[in-house]
Image (cartoon, helix red, strand yellow):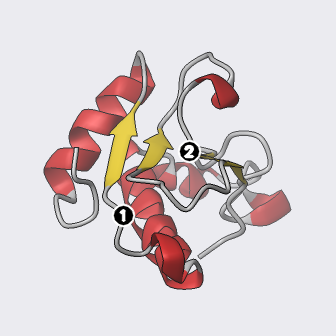
Amino acid sequence: MYNMTYLLYRNHSDNATSIFFYTGNEGRIEHFAENIIFAEHRYYGSSLPFGNESFSDRKHFGYLTAEQALADYAEFLTEFKCANPKLADLPVISFGGSYGGMLTAWFRQKYPNIVAG
């Protein structure tokens, strides 16, 4: 996997009941929940699958799809839970607005084994 940028806002309480995965829209991350992750969509910001070559060849733009972004999110969350054993058993609740809301709906539909709601 390429180096995807993500933000993590974590309440260090041991009482966490869920991991909230924010698929995007405008909003301050700390206003939402106790354990929240925002993973940057591929081809935005510094999340470039082909590094500096990401925009230099038209063939790379075939990877700028919602389906590919969902696969990135699924892989990221799987790796994140493995790296954070205390959070591994918590359900993931995905949410977002506008395009992020569409990503959330598709994410839940395509990866019900990763996203609980």
Residue at 66%, 50% in the rendered image: 10
In which quarter of the view is residue 60 placed? bottom right
Looking at the image, residue 116 lies above or below residue 98: below
> What x and y, as percent, mark residue 40?
63, 45
Residue at 69%, 22% in the rendered image: 28
- Which kind of residue does numbered mark 1 sit on? Leu
Residue at 23%, 35% in the rendered image: 105
Of the numbered discs 1 and 2, the one sitting upstream in the chain is 2
In depth, the one of 1 and 37 nearer the eye is: 37
Q: Give the labeled residue for mark 1.
A: 90
Specify the quadrant that holds the N terminus. bottom right
Q: Secondary structure at mark 2?
A: strand
In depth, the one of 46 and 26 nearer the eye is: 26
- Which kind of residue does numbered mark 2 sit on? Ile
Contact flag, marks 1 and 2 (Cβ < 8 Å): no
Real-space CA distance between mark 1 and mark 2, rounded to the nearest whole angstrom: 12 Å
Q: Give the labeled residue for mark 2.
A: 36
